Image (spheres, coloured by chain):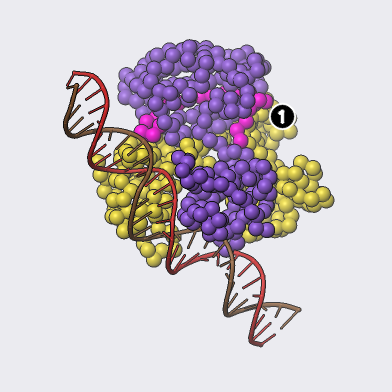
Chain colours: A yellow, B purple, C red, D brown
DNA sequence: AACATCCTAATGTCAGGACAAACTATTGAC
DNA sequence: GTCAATAGTTTGTCCTGACATTAGGATGTT
């Protein structure tokens, strides 16, 4: 039962020890070395084997529990979750998701403007009256096939946004280069049917199903940096996530 | 700038100290005592004021950061997020969500059976060939208005499920009473248009937009307890969540 | 054989301390 | 006046140690 997982911890590495443990166990689960349903050794022994303190070991396991790979039960032990685990929904842009996936997305910038924010945008971004924002709509394709139609509003007091840049990079990548450290986002996922404007752009029929997503992102200084309204072809996109009981 | 929040910590309470702090700060934010965008005192001072150790204080703030109410920045401090915060998507049943919301949902059990699991179900629940499951479809209404059409498969080796019980309680409530401690779930959210079967049940037109959700839930022993396929009227339901950068 | 009780093992909570790293603002030099 | 070095503040990481709580098996009794 006691599974020997010989992780190697590099104390001279700049990556935190607990994170090295997280990566090691993640890898062990992924490669099948740790089988689904199998029990891990207890925290204290594991910590001792790796010459780590128990709080450090525990913090690593905390993260794995939070991400859904492990399940703990007091008085019993820790198990690898038996289901094939999907990654929890993370704060990332569609563009990043696609490139990480090996796809090569392209972006058509349909409209681009630097305008005074309307009421809804001012409220979403907490801007004073008269403040200006970047507003643009983009069409994202993968393999030449349209996937998403995206409309965004971004505050203009952070970094300059260029129409050409938008055509070659993801929005979040541009903003990160501009010094924005995203911390969290609130979003709402729903559904609608394609209207006469959306359907031809997405190369589908009016009346076909679309997934809708509204998102507002906050950076590490607490500013609401960006808000957007996106629609995706339902036959090509869905949101996967892992929920963890807290 | 240093905001005085006089939380009271009860050391004789069975609820963990860090959780008392979480609740206290949550309440302070909710009541407006801690304004959006305001800075908190540093961890060490806060811990000292409440006669807590820094790790305990820190664990409390960790949770608040994870849930999206606070934003931390090394060398700078901790701020209350300026946006109105929505609760992150938690592992809960629709029924619980609705009752917590003050609504009074009703459930019609459309079909109910105790049958041998098909291939897809066996794979989703990790069951051996020949295993039996409960299979049922339900229609959930709020205020007499149909909201969701739900089809579920549940393993039968945990607790007995009664057709009548399903009509009066949520599924998760029944399973919890049966000794199931849910730990996590993986789910996928998408969209479709209502077909001829769904539309009349949901009192909408064929071709109207529906939000779809597929979910598989895991308990604290690592078993896949339940899997389901739900559809919601898009004009009445959407998924809200908070994503946190990890 | 059935039941209640005790024991053990594991996670959960909490303390107090130490140092590292990052950001800010001030100070100093040119 | 501008820029770079520096000091101080705050969070990030890690350690050792201790006790509480729970689950489940083992034990003993009826």
Looking at the image, which residue is at 55% across and 16% down? B107
> Residue A160 lies in magenta, yes or no?
no
Name above or below for residue B246 compared with residue D1. Answer: above
Dot 1: within a 10 Å radius of its alpha carbon, few (fewer than 14), some, or many (20 or more) residues?
some
Measuring from the top left, give residue A83's x and y in whole percent: 39, 34
* Quadrant of the image containing the N terminus of chain A: top left
SS assignment for the magenta stretch, majority: strand
Q: In this view, does C24 lie to the left or right of B18?
A: right
- In percent of width and height, residue B121 lies at 41, 24
Q: Can residue A137 be seen in this view?
A: no
Q: Looking at this rendering, what residue extends furthest in the right direction? A: A130
The boundaries of the magenta stretch are B219-241
- B80 or D5: which is nearer to us? B80
> What subunit carries mark 1?
A
Instruction: Name the residue nearer the viewer: B149 or C29.
Output: C29
Name the residue located 51 percent from the left edge and 24 percent from the top edge. Answer: B229
Q: Is label 1 in a helix, a strand or a loop?
A: loop
Q: Residue D12, how many percent across, how many down?
A: 50, 58
Q: Report if residue B98 is visible in the image.
A: yes
Could you tell me which residue is drawn at 62 percent across and 39 percent down?
A: B86
- Which residue is under mark 1? A195
């Amino acid at each position: 039962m006691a599974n020997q997982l010989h992780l190697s911890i590099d104390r001279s590495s700049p990556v935190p020890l607990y994170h090295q443990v997280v990566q090691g166990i993640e890898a062990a689960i992924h490669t099948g070395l740790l089988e689904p349903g199998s029990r891990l050794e207890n925290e204290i022994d594991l910590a001792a084997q790796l010459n780590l303190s128990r709080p450090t070991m525990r913090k690593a396991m905390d993260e794995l529990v939070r991400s859904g790979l492990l399940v703990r039960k007091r008085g019993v032990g820790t198990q690898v979750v038996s289901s094939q685990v999907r990654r929890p929904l993370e704060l990332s842009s569609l563009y990043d998701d696609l490139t990480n996936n090996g796809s090569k997305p392209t972006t058509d910038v349909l409209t681009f403007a630097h305008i005074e924010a309307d009421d809804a945008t001012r409220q979403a971004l907490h801007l004073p009256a008269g403040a200006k924002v970047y507003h643009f709509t983009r069409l994202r394709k993968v393999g030449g096939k349209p996937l998403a139609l995206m409309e965004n509003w971004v505050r203009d007091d952070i970094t300059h946004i260029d129409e050409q840049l938008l055509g070659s990079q993801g929005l979040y990548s541009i903003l990160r280069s501009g010094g924005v450290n995203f911390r969290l986002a609130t979003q709402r996922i729903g559904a609608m049917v394609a209207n006469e404007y959306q359907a031809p752009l997405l190369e589908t029929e009016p009346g076909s199903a679309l997934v809708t997503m509204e998102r507002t992102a906050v950076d590490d200084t607490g500013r609401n940096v960006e808000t957007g309204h996106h629609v995706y072809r339902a036959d090509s996109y869905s949101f996967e996530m892992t929920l963890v009981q807290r």
